[in-house]
Each structure stands twice: as structure tokens, then as C-alpha cells.
Image: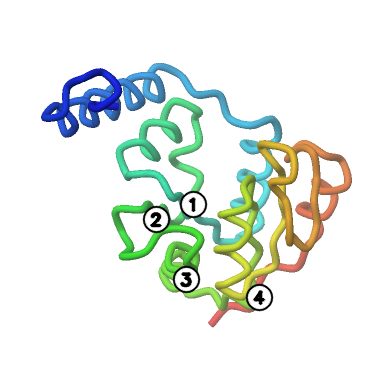
Amino acid sequence: MADYFGLPDAGPALAARLANLVWEELAAGTPALPGAHDMAEILLHRGIPIAVASNSPRRFVDAALGSAGLADLFHVIVSSDDVEHGKPAPDLYLTACSRLDAEPGRSVAFEDSRTGVASARAAGMFVIAVPSAPRAAADAHVTYHSLADTELGSWVATCTPPARR
């Protein structure tokens, strides 16, 4: 961007300004995806531990979850600030599973991108894709068009929680 605008030494300042604008937009109001709040509450009430494993910086994740009314529904939140390698590496998912004391092979990841699907699969998880763009669900085990899908909701309401250790 700095080169494009003819400001070769302004790269860090432009990056910081852009990050602040993104944070302001997220904090101002980010609606949850349809079905996300209900699904998280159902899993929470069923005693199934849930986490967020986001490739975004912590301040973006906190702002988005807070403005969407989801911040208090997760046992663990892992951001790109918490791991050495972001997606498509498995680090985010492996860290989330470790903090939940959950076995990745007995865990489910919900993903909206190819990079996220690759990350969850690399961690050894079962992947349910709810794509944010066409072809974003490549290699997912199952794909739904929305978290509010009736079939997906039925599964969430009846799936067996993992064994307690």
C-alpha cells in the first residue's frame, strides 16, 4: 500500500492505521452468523466444551465476539497471537484442543475457509464447513450453507458429548 500511494517509508504507519480501522469496525457491531449464538448456547448447556481458534489477532477476535454477543459462550479463545504458526498449520486447533483437554481426533471444527479447513484437517479433526465464499469448503467432511441449518441443529442437539477425563 505504501508503494502504491508513493509513500515508501509509511508502511508501518499505514498498516497500524488499517488495523485500527478494522478493529473500530468490529467493535462497532459485528453480527453473529445466523445460528451461531443458538448453537454455542446448546453446546454450552450440554456440557460440551467449545473454543474459538481464529487466524486473526486477539484484539480483532475479542472485538468481534464482544460486539456479536458471543464472548461469554466459549471456554477457550485462541488467536494468531497465541501460536507460532497460523492457519493452514494445525497450531491454532491443537492449542485450542489442548486447552480444552480434548483429543483432536474426537473433536469437531466449524470452518468457513479453505485455509481453516486445511488447518483443522491437519490437526486431525472432523471438519464441518459453513463456507463464506464459493469453494471454501474443499476437503471438509460435511458442508452446510448456514449454522442455522435444521439438520445441523438436530445433530448439535443430540450429539454425544466427549468422555470426561
The location of residue 79, given as percent across then percent down, is 37, 52
Q: What is the residue that sits farthest to the left in this orientation?
A: 9
**Residue located beneath label 3 in the image:** 94
Q: CA distance from mark 2 to mark 1?
A: 6 Å
Residue 147's label in the rendered image is none
Q: Position of residue 106 (x, y in %)?
A: 66, 75
Rendered residue at 87%/40% (across/down): 150
* Drawn side of residue 76 relative to residue 15, left or right: right
Residue to which mark 2 is pinned: 78
Give the residue type at disc 1: Val
Quadrant containing the N terminus in the rendered view: top left
Q: The residue under label 2 is which amino acid type?
A: Val
Q: Position of residue 144 (x, y in %)?
A: 80, 45
Between the residue at mark 3 and the residue at mark 1, the CA separation in whole angstroms equals 12 Å
* Label located before the other in sequence (3 or 4): 3
Precedes in sequence: disc 2 or disc 1: 1
Position of 34 compared to 64: left or right? right
- Residue neighbourhood size for the residue with mark 1, other residues' Cα within 10 Å, grouped as few (<14), some (14–19), many (≥20): many
Residue picked out by circle 4? 106
Q: Earlier in the sequence, mark 3 or mark 2?
A: 2
**Spatial separation of the CA atoms under disc 4 and disc 2:** 19 Å
Amino acid under label 3?
Answer: Leu
Mark sitting earlier along the chain (4/1) = 1
